[in-house]
Image (spheres, rainbow, N blue to C red):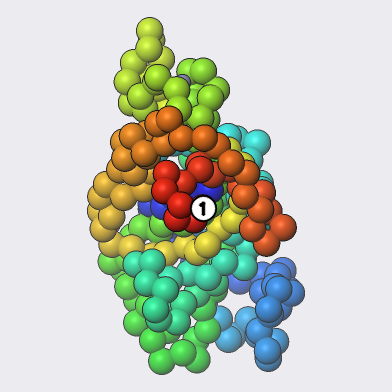
Amino acid sequence: MIIQRLSGPVMAVRDAKTSADLELINALSNPPLIPLGEDDVFVRRCRLAGDAVDTQFGCFRTHDLPKLLTLTHGAPALIGHNRQVTPVARFFGGGVEEFEGHRYIVPRFYWPKAHSGAEDFRVLLDAGIIAEASLAFIFDKPSCSICGRDIRECEHEPGAFYGLKICHYFYDGLDRVLEGSFVYRGAEPGTGILAEMTDLKRAIKDRKRITVRVGGRTYQAFAPLSGKDEG
Ligand SMILES: [Zn+2]
């Protein structure tokens, strides 16, 4: 179980809201308590993540993108991954779209016009001040593109050449989307899996794998070195 964050540009596309949008919003799990109408919300969309190798040398498998979009449906949208404050918007619907030869999930998101900060948020988005969105998700296994094993355990290094191939890894075992966040460009350099991987490789050396069940889900974990529990 690994938490990863990925950033990408927001496409603050001002599509006309459709009745289908409102139907999706009003049918979310934990839906609005008072059904929302077309005049109640702002709607934009953003390109969040795709099957191109990202700056952390990870990528989604193309056939996993519909699942990723489904997991994003209903997820909260925050500012700067700050979970201490109320989310500003919520993701819903959208599709998988092609961009520069790759495919990306492009969910839509809405926020209520009646909120006191709604117009400020709209202005920042539409003016391109808030220009990136970042997705926080949980996956199970970073699979090496060269050998298919867990890249934390094989000899290959992400970003290194093996013959003519650059090693990267796939986000396999997608489990959950925690949230999406609007961030300022370059707000999060060096976060994510690569920064952790060196430590992880060191930490898991010589450690036995164990299987942990949490809330009905099964996770692979590494046996603790000391008597202390972790997972
Ligand atoms: Zn490998």
Q: Residue at x 28, y 62 (%)?
A: 184
Mark 1 Cβ and ligand 1 under 8 Å apart: no
Residue 116: image quadrant is bottom left
Packing grade of label 1 (10 A; few <14, some 14-19, many >=20) is some
Whether residue 203 is visible, yes or no, is: yes
Q: Nearer the viewer, residue 174 or 206?
A: 206
Q: Residue at x 31, y 40 (%)?
A: 199
Q: Is residue 13 visible?
A: no
Q: What residue type is disc 1 on?
A: Gly
Q: Position of residue 37 (x, y in %)?
A: 66, 85
Q: Which residue appears at 53% of the width and 70% of the height?
A: 76
The correct choice, above or below, for 153 with respect to 40 in the image is above
As helix, strand or loop, the secondary structure at mark 1 comes to loop
Residue matched to label 1: 231
Looking at the image, the residue that sits furthest to the front is: 227
The residue at 72%/58% (across/down) is: 216
Q: How many marks?
A: 1
In this rendering, would 134 be left or right of 208? left
In which quarter of the view is residue 157 placed?
top left
**Image spot of residue 26 (x, y percent):** 71, 78
Q: Position of residue 229 (x, y in %)?
A: 49, 56
Residue closest to the eye, 201 or 58: 201
Q: Position of residue 148 (x, y in %)?
A: 55, 22
Vertical placement of residue 181 versus 19, above or below: above
